[in-house]
Amino acid sequence: MSVILGIDIGGSGIKGAPVDTTTGRLLKERHRIPTPDGAHPDAVGGVVAELARHFGLGGPIGVTFPGIVQHGRTLSAANVDDAWIGLDADALFTEATGQAVHLINDADAAGLAEARFGAGAGVGGTVLVLTFGTGIGSALIHNGILVPNTELGHLWLRDKEAEGWASDRARERDDLNWKQWSKRVSTYLQHLELLFSPDLFIIGGGVSKKADKWQEHLKLERSRLVPAKLLNEAGIVGAAMMAQGNAGQNDGGNPPATPASGPKPASKAARKK
């Protein structure tokens, strides 16, 4: 058993827990601390250090970040302080905790966890994990290997960014019922189908708890689609997986893994029989 501390930085709270990276299980109850106002790097670093002290677990720490992460640096700053842009956040958190810290984009972390231990477990080929909330997060995984920082919520669709039109926030803003929202999401997913031909879509974020309201309304040409399973634990689990794999070895935050195996998807003609 390999136990790694995973920490998930969110807009309202920063939460963490020790993770058994061989099973994806949290070994202790999550501990949550409110995100400091403004989310300045130094203040967030202090919370990460507090969580590390709370659990008292040695070894590397995995941390998610709500933005682009490359070579340990944060390159965007949506809903957090602009001081994150270009910051060596790995170094900041490593100094704050006194332990080796490795950062990963939050949607990428959730995608890794879902593909290994959640709704994508045992599925070979290409898995595309999408989280619908304030925006649309994305994680593209092929045979267990993550392609980091895809940011597919920012694809342009119908003369606007997809997340501004098809996110859960857009559903609430435009007062859409679930069927109306599902029509927008279907258009978006069909576009992604043309670009990536995924074997499986996994739909996460807050909407995954209400799959019975939208799943039957989503229409795809050839890909399968399922709701996410790990819910609020996905980011913590994925962060721990990435830290175990040592992001510096592969630049993508991928943990050591053998490609997932599974039956090849049936052809479109075969599925119609």
Image: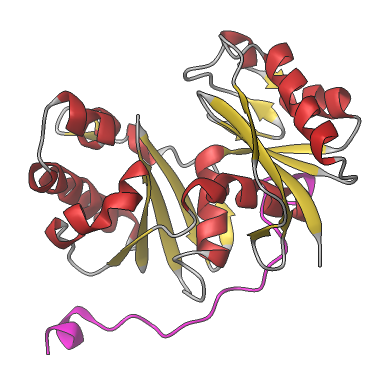
Taking 80 as reference, is 265 left or right?
A: left
Q: Is residue 8 above or below residue 91?
A: below
Vertical placement of residue 154 versus 85, above or below:
below
Residue that protrudes farthest toward the front in the picture: 29
Q: Residue at x 43, y 62 (%)?
A: 127
Q: Is residue 226 left or right of residue 222?
A: right
Whether residue 4 appears in magenta in the rendering, the answer is no
* Quadrant of image for the C terminus: bottom left
x, y percentage for residue 200? 36, 66
Residue 210 x %, y % = 27, 51
Write down the region rendered in magenta: 247-273
Rendered view: 32 above or below 19? above
Q: Quadrant of residue 154?
A: top left
Along the line of sight, which residue is nearer the eye, 37 or 106?
37
Residue displayed at 89% across by 46% down: 59
* Residue 268 seen in render: yes
Q: Observer-nearest residue: 96 or 249?
A: 96
Place of residue 109 in the rendered image (x, y in percent of width and height, measured from the top left): 57, 47
Q: Residue at x 57, y 65 (%)?
A: 116
Say which residue appears at 70% left-offset and 45% top-offset: 17
Q: Quadrant of residue 72?
A: top right
Q: Is residue 261 magenta?
A: yes
Looking at the picture, the colour scheme in use is: secondary structure
173 or 115: which is nearer to us? Answer: 173
Count of marks overlaid on the render: 0
Quadrant of the snapshot with the N terminus: bottom right
Image position of 172 (left or right of 129): left
Q: Is residue 64 visible?
A: no
Expressed as whole percent of the image width and height from the top left, the position of residue 171 reads 18, 33
Dominant SS of magenta comes to loop
